[in-house]
Amino acid sequence: MMYEEIYKALVEARLEEIYEPQDYLVFFCLGNREAQGGDGTSIAGNSTATNTPKAKSRNSRRFMIYVHSKGMVVDDEYVILGSANINQRSLDGARDTEIAMGAYQPHHTWASKQSSPHGQEYAYDYLHLIVQIYGYRKSLWAEHIGDLEECFERPESLECMRRVRSLSELNWKQYAAEEVTEIKGHLLKYPVEVDREGNVNPLPGCETFPDVGGKIVGGPGKYLSVLQERGDNLTI
């Protein structure tokens, strides 16, 4: 899979002892957890059904966040937003009924700046007002991570990659814990283990999503099993 391909590339470059696949590719999900207020306020619902996903989520006070809109920010230079999936079918314009917009600022590109699109000529406090794609990305990070750190200025850096991954792992632990506590950020690292060779496994003791169920790593469906029995090449 993708992580294995990254590992192969690291081996070819003789860098497998220095870097690992998750230094280049990480998957996240969004969730929220709110501690009960001191006034004893609770969420209304059927208290008799205690073993349903709804009741479990209510009692644990954690909820997965589902975002229907699609978006991508590339190098703090280009942004695409909309309901359209980011693939050929949805963005073709003559197939699915979808909408999306793409935007960039001609004076704030890597080519025009010969460096990071947000440059260095503006006071830091006003950068997000002038360089709007950079500002939009920073705003999203502040919302989902719950903080802004200096390394976030260079999202392509190894320091930033590892820091965001570390914060998201802490958020997941807080989200999955038995104790109900308020989560500062919404960004959760997708709960899988990826070893240095790119092998993917569920976290120990966390094979399914809390409360709602569903295998985290997944498995072959009926149609896929038929193809495998038939001997079709399913290499990705």
Image: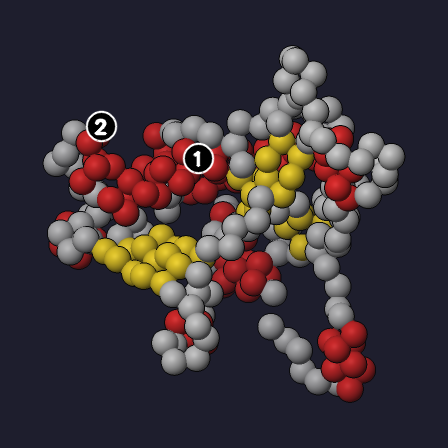
Query: What residue did someone put label 2 on?
Result: 125
Q: Position of residue 68 (x, y in %)?
A: 51, 55
Quadrant in which residue 50 is drawn: top right
Identity of the residue drawn at 62% across and 27% down: 34
The disc at residue 101 is none
Left or right, residue 119 beside residue 152: left
Identity of the residue drawn at 19% across and 53% down: 105
Frontmost residue, 112 versus 197:
112
Disc 2 on helix, strand or loop? helix
Q: CA distance from mark 1 to mark 2?
A: 18 Å
Confirm or deny contact between disc 1 and disc 2 (CB under 8 A): no
Query: What residue did someone put label 1 on?
Result: 143
Q: Is residue 151 above or below residue 28?
A: above
Left or right, residue 142 beside residue 131: right
Amino acid type for the residue under numbered disc 1: Glu
Identity of the residue drawn at 35% across and 38% down: 138
Frontmost residue, 201 versus 99:
99
Quadrant in which residue 37 is drawn: top right
Frontmost residue, 233 versus 83:
83
